Amino acid sequence: MSTTHEDPPVPEGGVPDELVPDELVLAGEFDTPSRDEWTAAVDGVLRKARRITDDAPLGAGVEKLAWTTPDGIRVQPLYAAEDVEGLPATGVPGSAPYVRGDLATGHVPGGWDVRQQHALADPEAAKLAVMADLECGVSSIWLGLGPNGAPVSSLAAILDEVLLDLAPVVLDAGPEAEAAAEAFLALAADKGVAGDALLGTLGLDPVGLRARTGSGPAVESVVPLATRVANEFPHVKAVVVDATPVHEAGGSDAQELGFSLAAGVEYLRALTADLDVPTAARLLEFRYAATGEQFPTIAKLRAARRLWSRVLEASGADGPGQAQHAVVSPTMFTRRDPWVNMLRGTVSGFAAGVGGADAVTVPPFDSALGQSEPFSRRVARNTQTLLIEESHLARVIDPAGGSWYVEHLTDDLAQAAWAFFQEIEGAGGAVAALDSGLVAEKVAEVRAIREKGVATRKTPLTGVSEFPNLDEKPVERTPLPAPVERGGLPLYRPAEAYEAYRDRSDALLAEKGERPQAFLATLGPLAAYTARAAFARNLLQAGGIAGPEAGPTECAEDVAKAFEGVGTPVAVICSTDKLYDERAETTAAALREAGAAYVLLAGRPKEPVPGVDGYLFAGCDALAVIGDVYGALEGEK
């Protein structure tokens, strides 16, 4: 019997209406499993893997697969229709609560605004980079001025060839924001750009400046310029509500959202002294971080629109929707193995686009190293072009909408963010909460959780804490000016602690001709020690420590003999639990006799092994282990 499937011929004129099913059933030939049946099947797999006991109650395995976010949100491994019953309605695109987007037509056909950042101090270099981006696919420019880039006085020179009625310019001048805004509006007038044709964002943000630097002008300082914009420039936004300082300090998604609401409300209160709520809200653009955590980023942007819609509703308005600028988090980028940053940028940009951001910024992959080169800026803008033009992400409005997981996570984030917003409001608002240290204190609690995840490698950093390459060829870039002390919320870059050890290793290599080493004391045949030796080597190399090994051995004496020729005081015993029971103690003693000052063991035995100083295992504090090894190498252990 033939197993080849051929579709029946389609009648001329198409399929008759009576043959078209009302509902397409994709798995109609299979029985629909109940949730208990699915749960029992999952439990069975984890029971075989010995992750739960044989007498564990139903659901114990599923619970093992659940995890908790820094916001305390419990994420389940499976969501079904019943999990979203009773959740608030998401509405339709272009209408309150704007969960599905602030535009009824989405970003079709051209896609979202591809916005690239320029923060070069040299005006001529900045001009060339801006024009190169605009000529090659970028649709708007995020321009750093003053302490964030070129002098404000050079604004006209940088934008000399930019058509301000076609390419929006977003200003970012920190404490010089008002001067930059005045210069921009004057430039538009000099160019003869009509008020109703000018595009862009003036970038006024005293709250965000305060979050970064610890000081800034009063919120009311934005009112004169914002009122002028409201009266003369219908397509220009005056104020940026920047929540990224909270993210950059290690804050959670809900904290970022809650802070943005509090800052937005501060501006509304100031602006509505002269303007109505819808007009004041139109002048605001919200800036959020997009990260490699794809689904949380999507849910965060959806929740942000819902939350802001609720604020406007409480203020007596039913719109407009929230204008969003999603910035791929620069703190996520690494200096080691920077090519992986291309992947981080792609996933984050994907999440920002799917989440419905109006404008998206993907930094160049080498932005953590220094001044980005034309090649890396090209890769950054082409990343978004591929997402829009070749992957067609913008052709579907809210593609994640309807996913039970995404809808549930959107609601969970909205609830947690609203609670943090209320806490900030209870403290007197965003400015008061920053000045009192409330925001810093709450963010520090989450940052501690993140730091632990990075240190234990439960939050892996590919190319840094996982799969490092000690022989990688450095990517050289012109250094950027030394960063100015922030003074406000700190800057937390997860890879920094590991990279500091890698720098230390490079310095020793340059000075002594070899890297620091920890000898891998491998017990037994290759098959016995390979797994744990690879684990130990990977962990040590994350700190720039090389790991020469003994190779196959038959006894403790073989290990000690191999150790003697290496010239390091640190040894790591690697093998199976069975061989540890037989040889670990005698091997540790032999290593000590051969001159080892610090002995570790790869594994987590039930009882301490005499002669062993510490243990390497999945979930251990890798940074602490690396620090201890450096201490032993320098005679501190």
Image: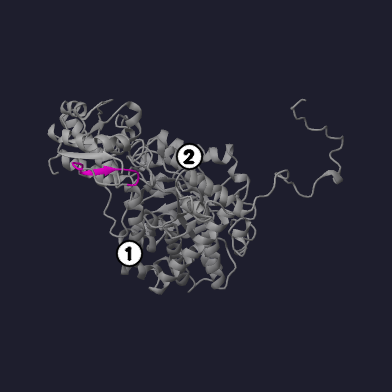
Residue 441, label in figure: 1
Marks 1 and 2, how far apart at CA: 37 Å
Residues 481 and 404: in front is: 404
Question: Does residue 249 appear in the picture of this structure?
Answer: no
**Within 10 Å of the Cα at label 1, are there few (<14), some (14-19), or many (20+) other Cα atoms?**
some
Above or below, 544 relative to 400:
above
Say which amino acid is labelled 2: Arg
Residues 562 and 84: in front is: 562
Above or below, 126 relative to 197:
above
Q: Residue at x 40, y 71 (%)?
A: 429
Name the spot of residue 121 as percent of width and height, x first: 33, 45
The secondary structure that dominates the magenta segment is: loop
Of badges 1 and 2, the one in the foreground is: 1
SS class of the residue under badge 1?
helix
SS class of the residue under badge 2?
helix
Residue 336, label in figure: none
Determine which quarter of the picture holds residue 587. Answer: top left
- The residue wearing badge 2 is 381
Q: Residue at x 52, y 71 (%)?
A: 275
Determine which quarter of the picture holds residue 570. Answer: top left
Above or below, 427 relative to 441:
below
Name the spot of residue 431 as percent of width and height, x first: 37, 68
- Magenta region: 610-619
